[in-house]
Image: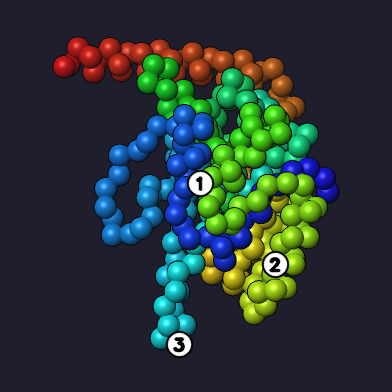
Amino acid sequence: MTGKAILYDATKCTACRACQVACKQWNELTAEVTTNRGTYENPPDLSWDTWIKMEFREVGNNGNFSWLFTRRACMHCTDAACVTVCPTKALYYHEMGFVAYDKDKCSGCGYCVEACPFDVPRSSSGAITGIRTINKCTLCQDRVTNELEPACVKTCPTGALMYGDRAALLAEGKARVASLGGNATLYGENQLGGLHVLYVLDDAPAVYGLPVDPQVPVSATAWQDILQPVGWGVAGLAAMGLGLNYVIAKRKIKIESEGK
């Protein structure tokens, strides 16, 4: 398998969240208003404006306490459920290996949100039309296509993030796991055809909250068998639905405005 990838070494990560900040700055994503929920995790989840989130897990072993950190973002699967279900080809495989996204083609159907085994894509409704669009990590497509590292990799102060050819990073990850020993694991070599975000873990994937054997849902392909034969009829109904959605949303905004 060719293409580029990111290698995340959880054993080197301090959860400083510099990657979160760099991602927001480079992609001009809005900061979120959050509250103290009694955890170091902030914001509480991925969203339309948050493409990377560091997760903190408390682990106890024979009376000893330690932290496990996990980077949560798009895994850029080789066999990506989101690409499979996207009816408008807004999500597609880039020649460099990652899952790219064309916002202008997004219909806001939300199929990718439901299909992703890693629960990554997030949607948001437009204030005027009420039509949803989705967002997710793009592997800094505008940077990597100009021979620059992704913003998160560039800013990582501990070397927990690396970017390069997937084959080379795969070898690097295996060597790191061998040196760590114990329950250390390399995650992403074969899952979903091979992930373009590889993880070096100090323990089993399940301990980090990762699916051991993520699968593309059967529903991700079944819809195509049902809808594709209908062809332009579905496209016409979809257009009518979007038009009705626009009228309803516009009327709602007018009513709310008059009520102020």
Please state if 186 lies on the left or on the right of 158 as rendered.
Answer: right
| Residue placed under numbered mark 1 in the picture | 19
- Identified at 72% across, 73% down, the residue is 178
| Residue placed under numbered mark 2 in the picture | 176
Residue type, mark 3 in image: Asn
Q: Nearer the viewer, residue 112 or 239?
A: 112
Q: Nearer the viewer, mark 1 or mark 3?
A: 1
Q: Position of residue 176 (x, y in %)?
A: 70, 67
- Mark with earlier residue (2, 3): 3
- Characterize the local packing of mark 1: few (<14), some (14-19) or many (20 or more) Cα atoms within 10 angstroms: many
- Identified at 61% across, 35% down, the residue is 140
Marks 2 and 3, how far apart in space?
A: 26 Å
Q: Where is residue 149 in the image (x, y as percent from the top left)?
A: 64, 40
Seen in the picture, residue 139 relative to 142 is either above or below; the reply is below
Q: In which quarter of the image is the C terminus?
A: top left
Q: Where is residue 166 in the image (x, y as percent from the top left)?
A: 76, 50
Q: State how many labels appear.
A: 3
The local secondary structure at tag 2 comes to: helix
Residue type, mark 1 in image: Cys
The answer to whether residue 79 is seen in the rendering is no
Q: Which of 235 and 87 is in front in this view?
A: 87
For the residues bearing labels 1 and 3, Cβ distance under 8 angstroms? no
| Residue placed under numbered mark 3 in the picture | 62
Residue at the front extreme?
157
Marks 1 and 3, how far apart in space?
A: 33 Å
The local secondary structure at tag 1 comes to: helix
- Characterize the local packing of mark 2: few (<14), some (14-19) or many (20 or more) Cα atoms within 10 angstroms: some
